[in-house]
Image (spheres, rainbow, N blue to C red):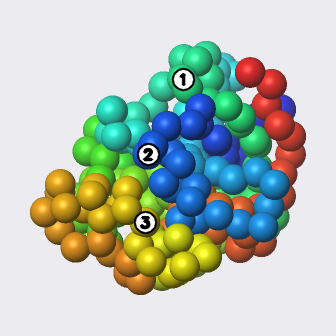
Amino acid sequence: MFKNADLLFLQSIPDNFSQAIVDSTVTSKKVTYDHVALVEVTAANEIFVLHTLPSTGSIREPYSRFKTRDWAQIDLFRANQSIDAAQIIAQAKQLLDQPYNDSYKPNAHGYYCADFVYTAFENNQIFKLIPMNFTDQKTGIILPFWVDYYAQLGVPVPNGKLGLDPNEMVQQGGLHQITNVVL
């Protein structure tokens, strides 16, 4: 079922952080995502997931461990065009052991999930950066969660700065869904 450089789009069991991501990146789709991760299938058919979380930074972990995290839903996607999966995995491995970029600011140290995948796909790019959104989709006002979050970091909200989020990655049309992965 899994192939190298497949992507897992995830919906977390709701908490304030995941809900703030969804609220500011909501789409017209029924399913909204707050995390994205990259699949690696080794020559021995072992399945690993390469991704980054606030609690771990960028890691490579066995799929058996990954799927036990707090996910409500996991959907498997694949690129629509031909990609060099081995190059993408090699690039992602170079990004491991980096801190989580909790500011989501471009060029900040570390990576957030969509930034990690975007960088791994650097030479096979199927995504484009867009102005990031931290606002209520209906009012256009920055969500209180993000105001507080960035106040604690001591930096301005990077609203409108170029970046990427899991929902936008799916909407850009470079991927197609293979299946919903049963937990």
Q: Quadrant of residue 43?
A: top right
Q: CA distance from mark 3 to mark 2?
A: 12 Å
Residue 30 percent coordinates (x, y): 81, 54
Above or below 19: residue 55: above
Q: CA distance from mark 1 to mark 2?
A: 15 Å
Please report contact status of discs 3 and 2: CB closer than 8 Å, yes or no.
Answer: no
Tell me which amino acid carries mark 1.
Arg
Q: Residue at point 37% right, 56% down? A: 145
Above or below 102: residue 159: below
Badge 2: how crowded within 10 Å, few (<14), some, or many (20+)? some
Q: Is residue 71 left or right of residue 50?
A: right
Instruction: Give the secondary structure at mark 3.
Output: loop
Which label belongs to residue 143? 3
Above or below 36: residue 59: above
Identify residue for label 2.
17
Residue nearest the viewer, comparing 172 with 6 = 172
Above or below 116: residue 135: below
Mark 1 / mark 2, whichever is N-terminal? 2
Identify residue for label 1.
69
Residue nearest the viewer, comparing 82 with 117 = 117
Tell me which amino acid carries mark 3.
Leu
Badge 3: how crowded within 10 Å, few (<14), some, or many (20+)? some
Residue 36 percent coordinates (x, y): 58, 48
Instruction: Give the secondary structure at mark 1.
Output: loop
